[in-house]
């Protein structure tokens, strides 16, 4: 039996295929979602929605029948579709007396600690006001080419869930959950009820991609589950078209597949884990062991430094951990092999005497 009775903060992710019917947003469906989410809000829970569908709606307005692939046209579709999509939510939630707020994010915003904190503050305030933040990627400004895009909202939803300290991510899709083999190809495939660890075997059960304007497939859902589980957040992957799906999941019904969290991480550690690294510090075995045992990283353990970064950047340690470095890449190179006590002599008394403190180091440990 699943017990979600104590969960306060929930992220609900709605995919394009779930939200639409015959190529258009299904207004009646949005209405049913709004009703279920509103009853959770009245029950003193906090809910954030990650929505897809802007590109699909824009493509519909532009009467595009086939999948749009040109970046500029995709951006235009998103810009045309996003306000229409929001209007659907506004009307549906309005009927339940609940306010919605549009929040558009990019990978860049989530990776930068300052903009991430701004985002977190505004989301916290919206939740305090009883509003539902409706989040989508800001597709018209972020693209793969400039490396600011998430690409799919599966990953975005897990990152948001992890960064706002949600306890549960409900990923509503057009699949019934995770199967041990592709149910589209094998009629005897059985659904997995609980996944405790996303092993390479579990990854293998992922099928192909979604259709039409949707981006994610089972693989991106499992990647999202990894991000969520690593951040201490449970994830339920379920068919969004199940009757009263959110309400029943919250009541403990065994719908879809639940992915269990791996560990509890502090807010700062989640942020470190989900930030893009600016470089790599290669460290020796002893230093890696020490870091794994919650010890600081000392300059004596550094073997080499790759990339150019400033003090305060998030970097990889041997591709096995992520850390906030107290020194820039140039400074680190000058400290290689040095004893901690020599750091201040070299760089000044006001500087830290370790490369990274345990609170700023997170093992990736997938
Ligand atoms: N941000 C895209 C949109 O709103 C959706 C991406 C996805 O389907 O994952 O259309």
Image: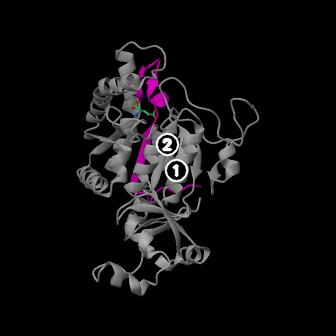
Q: Is residue 21 magenta?
A: yes
Q: Is 289 above or below relative to 366?
A: below
Query: How many numbered marks does the figure carry?
Result: 2
**Viewer-proximal residue among 363 and 217:** 363
Q: Is residue 327 left or right of residue 184?
A: left
Q: Helix or strand or loop: what does disc 1 sit on?
A: strand
Residue named by callout 1: 235
Q: Quadrant of ligand 1?
A: top left
Q: Helix or strand or loop: what does disc 2 sit on?
A: strand
Mark 2 sits near ligand 1, with its Cβ under 8 Å away: no
**Residue extent of the magenta highlight:** 1-29
Residue named by callout 2: 171
Mark 1 nearby-residue class (10 Å; few <14, some 14–19, many ≥20): many
Q: Position of residue 152 (x, y in %)?
A: 46, 37
Q: What colouring does the structure picture have?
A: one colour
- Please tell me which of labels 1 and 2 falls first in the chain: 2
Residue 19 seen by the camera? yes
Q: Residue at x 48, y 57 (%)?
A: 233
Instruction: Give yes or no for contact between labels 1 and 2 (Cβ–Cβ under 8 Å).
Output: yes
């Amino acid at each position: 039996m699943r017990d979600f009775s104590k969960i306060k903060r929930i992220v609900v992710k709605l995919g394009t295929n779930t939200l639409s019917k015959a190529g258009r947003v299904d207004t009646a469906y949005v209405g049913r979602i709004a009703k279920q989410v509103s009853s959770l809000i009245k029950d003193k829970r906090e809910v954030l929605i990650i929505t897809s569908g802007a590109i699909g709606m824009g493509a519909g307005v532009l009467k595009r029948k086939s999948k749009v692939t040109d970046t500029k046209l995709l951006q235009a579709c998103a810009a045309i579709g996003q306000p229409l999509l929001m209007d659907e939510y506004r009307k549906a939630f309005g009927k339940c007396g609940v306010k919605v707020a549009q929040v558009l994010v990019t990978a860049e915003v989530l990776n930068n600690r300052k903009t991430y904190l701004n985002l977190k503050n505004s989301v916290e305030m919206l939740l305090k006001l009883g509003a539902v933040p409706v989040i989508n990627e800001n597709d018209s400004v972020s693209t793969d080419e400039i490396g600011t895009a998430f690409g799919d909202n599966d990953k975005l939803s897990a990152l948001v869930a992890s960064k706002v300290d949600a306890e549960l991510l409900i990923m509503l899709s057009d699949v019934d959950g995770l199967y041990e083999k592709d149910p589209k190809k094998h009629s005897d495939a059985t659904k997995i009820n609980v996944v405790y660890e996303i092993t390479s075997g579990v990854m293998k059960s992922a099928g192909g991609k979604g259709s039409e304007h949707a981006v994610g497939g089972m693989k991106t859902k499992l990647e999202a589950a990894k991000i969520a589980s690593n951040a201490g957040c449970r994830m339920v992957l379920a068919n969004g078209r199940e009757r009263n799906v959110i309400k029943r999941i919250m009541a403990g019904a065994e719908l879809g597949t639940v992915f269990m969290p791996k560990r509890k991480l502090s807010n700062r550690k989640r942020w470190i884990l989900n930030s893009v690294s600016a470089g790599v510090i290669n460290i020796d075995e002893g230093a890696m062991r020490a870091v794994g045992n919650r010890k600081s990283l000392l300059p004596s353990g550094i073997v080499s430094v790759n990339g150019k970064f400033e003090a305060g950047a998030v970097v990889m340690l041997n591709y096995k951990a992520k850390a906030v470095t107290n020194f820039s890449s140039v400074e680190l190179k000058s400290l290689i092999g040095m004893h901690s006590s020599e750091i201040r002599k070299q760089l000044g008394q006001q500087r830290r005497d370790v490369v990274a403190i345990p609170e700023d180091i997170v093992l990736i440990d997938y």
